[in-house]
Image (tube, rainbow, N blue to C red):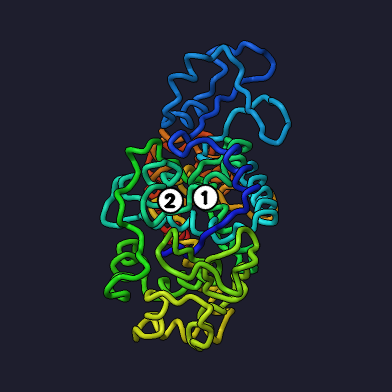
Amino acid sequence: MAEAFSLSLTPPQMASLSGAAVASSRLLPRARLGFSTSSSTPSPSSLSLSSLKCLRSSPLLSHLLHRQKTTSVRASSGGLGFSSVAAPKCSASDPDQLKSAREDIKELLKSNFCHPILVRLGWHDAGTYNKNIEEWPLRGGANGSLRFEIELKHGANAGLVNAVKLLQPIKDKYSGVTYADLFQLASATAVEEAGGPKIPMKYGRVDASGPEQCPEEGRLPAAGPPSPADHLRDVFYRMGLNDKEIVALSGAHTLGRSRPERSGWGKPETKYTKDGPGAPGGQSWTVQWLKFDNSYFKDIKEKIDEELLVLPTDAILFEDPSFKVYAEKYAVDQEAFFKDYAEAHAKLSNLGAKFDPPEGIVMDDGPAEAAPEKFVAAKYSSGKRELSEAMKQKIRAEYEAVGGSPDKPLQSNYFLNIMIVIAVLAFLTTLFGN
């Protein structure tokens, strides 16, 4: 897309950013080793198998193991000094750190008015997904690869280095959160804090490990293609999205400004952008370009304000017969727009992602917790897989009814046991009945 979600900063803000972030090409994923705090010199036996499993994909693993004798510490950018790191849970991101990071993002939004560029960051990290490529991370999608310089230099990502720099202090503070999760967390939080709908997000995305895993340039949508409708469908259908989701996601242009020096689109400034907030300038799609609502669709339909931006890919939403059905609906029904947008945003944020745990991590207003594990009986009938605590509780009654135990799975097939019991009961019922 064009600079749909752009951010301009005042000189003092730019100065603070330049000292706060490292070069994009050096933004490498971090790994943590957890040791017992009872001894300052942990032995190799203090490493749990689950800790090793969590670190198996880290490029820093061998280096960390070589330095086992040094107690693992985490530096905080918030002036909290150093603290011992607890043994990590076997998941890509730490649930408690995710919640804390969300609160820090909210404060960042209040002070920097960076809602648009954080939405765009999450979108562009996920929007490279290609459903026709199965292998991760070559298929693209929400894997944090946008932190690398080679991808930040793609034309469609102009200016997004500023978004990465804004989030880097939060990443440094919460090293247990992956870049992939942080980008999507920031994007969803920005929508919600701007007055938009609650996004049904899940977390636990695994990071791409290096710039060689970045997708090639050209997977993101352009602003002014020769055939806007065909272009939008080519790009979004490749991701597995449909016409309704294309139109709903386009509605996020209610946030932000386009800057001609970055995208080649828009005016240098308008009466709605000349005074900021942030550095003045650019052309917005809506009058209140930091408020998430359905005014984007209203303004395009009415076409009465020349100060507002309408790209070819915006105008086509009311010209293409299939797109128009949804655009007309959202222009008069904000509740419908919010519902469809929340679903489409959540779907987009999951595209191409590899989750650890596979079911993801769901956050709510209470403690963060893993999403309920889907029960597949075949996984628990061989005696070779350790049961999770949640699953032990879920199938305890059923297992014990056929002589099993949550701590020692049945060696024979689970469903076969059930069928045998049913057959025996049916036989006994018939026998005693006669």
Q: Residue at the location (49% across, 58% down)? A: 120
* Residue type at numbered disc 2: Ala
**Front residue of this view, candidates 72 and 150:** 150
* Residue type at numbered disc 1: Phe
- Res 291 → quadrant: bottom right
CA–CA distance between discs 2 and 1?
A: 8 Å
Of the image marks 2 and 1, the number of the one nearer the N terminus: 2
In the depicted structure, whether residue 213 falls above or below residue 280: above
Picture coordinates of residue 429, whole percent (x, y): 46, 60
- Res 339 → quadrant: bottom right
Q: Residue at the location (35% across, 83% down)? A: 322
**Front residue of this view, candidates 404 and 274:** 274
Q: The residue tagged with tag 1: helix, strand or loop?
A: helix
Where is mark 1, residue-wise? 183
Q: Residue at the location (53% across, 66% down)? A: 282
Q: Quick check: marks 2 and 1 in contact, CB under 8 Å? A: yes
Where is mark 2, residue-wise? 142
